[in-house]
Image: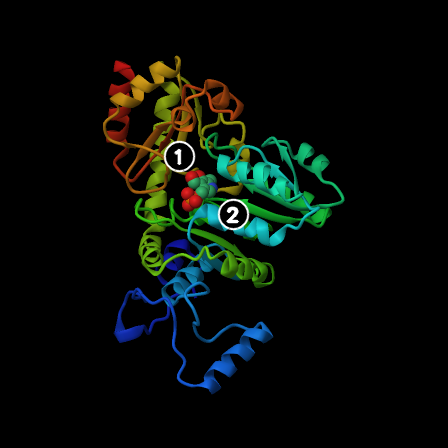
Amino acid sequence: MADHISTLAVHGGEEKSKPYGAVTMPIIQTSTYAFPNTEEVLKFVGMKESGGPLPRDEYGRYSNPTQSVVERKLAALDDGERALLFASGMNAITTTLLALLSSGDHLVMINDCYHRTRDFAMEFLKRWNISVTLVPSGRLDALDQAVRPNTRLIFAESPTNPYLRVVDIDGLVEIARRHRLLTFMDTTFATPVNLRPIKLGVDLVMHSATKYLGGHNDLLAGVVIGSQRILADIEKMRGMLGGMSNPNDAYLLLRGLKTLDLRVRRQNENGLRVAEFLEKHPAIERVHYPGLPSHPDHETARRQMTGFGGVVSFEVKGDFDRTARFIDRIRLPYMGPTLGGVESIIQQVSAFFSLDPVKRKAAGFKDNLVRYALGIEDADDLIKDLDQALLGS
Ligand SMILES: Cc1ncc(COP(=O)(O)O)c(C=O)c1O
């Protein structure tokens, strides 16, 4: 019916006819679903056992009608056969890794990724005899060499948090196919507006829907998108670990998604304007933004993305304290973790990570590194605010 993201964001996954003639899908606030008689129960259980698509809901840990509409919309936005919604992005990542990997397997991971994802692999997967090799971003040769006979999966994030490195997806998929490996990508920073990796051959895509997909800093959710064949085991694991999203957050996500294209386009514009301003500013040492020709992955980003996103990371000239003074002078954004909402949010990455400079360095977070997640405010106002904060710091 429609291939354009803005149309899919509004109509994708939605039935025209909803309960009570409502235009918006209602929140179905229930934890369980009643059956009219035993015959219906047996029919349902038979369908479940045959592995076919289920015609109705049974229990809230497995599905909910509000959440099912969101899943269908998210699958449509990312060109997937199906999507599974989770209580958070981390829940989506951990449940998927636990469902797909077994003791004795090996995982290859691009090391510049959200640090909790990396910590889960290094701390817990290893504990369960799943070995992990971290490879630097931008080094497909290292990725190829890291593959072993027991490698099962490649995990990558693009663009990465916080250095905005962009993975060459064509190269990654070529390696995975040659070695018959599954590919799993976190494209939270890109959103389907800027990047659709399933079209490029990636098996599974995930997002922290807490960020751009929800878009209003008011919900926690995660999603994994892919083929029904691969998602079947992940769905089973979700039902056991219990990380299902709740109907209220599913509704907020559904509502947020309808404006995804508008919001992300504005955030792309703000990202580029702010990155260009910062790169010319004498108080700034370095800017990390894939839309700038100075970024090491600029050409890859231009080839595979349709926008460069709303997060700009940069290094202030000076030490931890000078950077903190700058952050404390800035007025418009909130200071905190997360990104992707309509309100701009800024953070000195190392300050949020640890009090211990040694730990910060080991995690790769420079003391003067700032991550600025731009909202949908006017770029001129954002730049004016940055300018006054940098002059006074
Ligand atoms: C790239 C990326 N992936 C995953 C996550 C985890 O998502 P959530 O906070 O929804 O669990 C985050 C959170 O910051 C993130 O930035």
Indicate which label's residue lies in the foreground, 1 or 2.
2
Distance between mark 1 and mark 2 Cα atoms:
21 Å
Q: Position of residue 178 (x, y in %)?
A: 73, 47
User: Which residue occupies the foreground of this view, 124 or 276?
Assistant: 124
Q: Quadrant of ligand 1?
A: top left
Mark 1 surroundings: few (<14), some (14-19) or many (≥20) residues within 10 A: many
Q: Are marks 1 and 2 in contact (CB under 8 Å)?
A: no
Query: Where on the picture, by quarter, is residue 342?
Result: top left
User: Which residue occupies the foreground of this view, 193 or 303?
Assistant: 193
Question: What quarter of the picture does the C terminus occupy?
Answer: top left
Queried on whether the Cβ of the residue with tag 2 lies below 8 angstroms from ligand 1, the answer reads yes
Rendered residue at 38%/70% (across/down): 32
| Amino acid under disc 1 | Val
| Amino acid under disc 2 | Ile
Query: Where on the picture, by quarter, is residue 289?
Result: top left
Rendered residue at 34%/24% (across/down): 277
User: Which residue occupies the foreground of this view, 216 or 178?
Assistant: 216
Q: Position of residue 203 (x, y in %)?
A: 59, 52
Q: Position of residue 175 (x, y in %)?
A: 69, 43
Residue bearing mark 2: 93
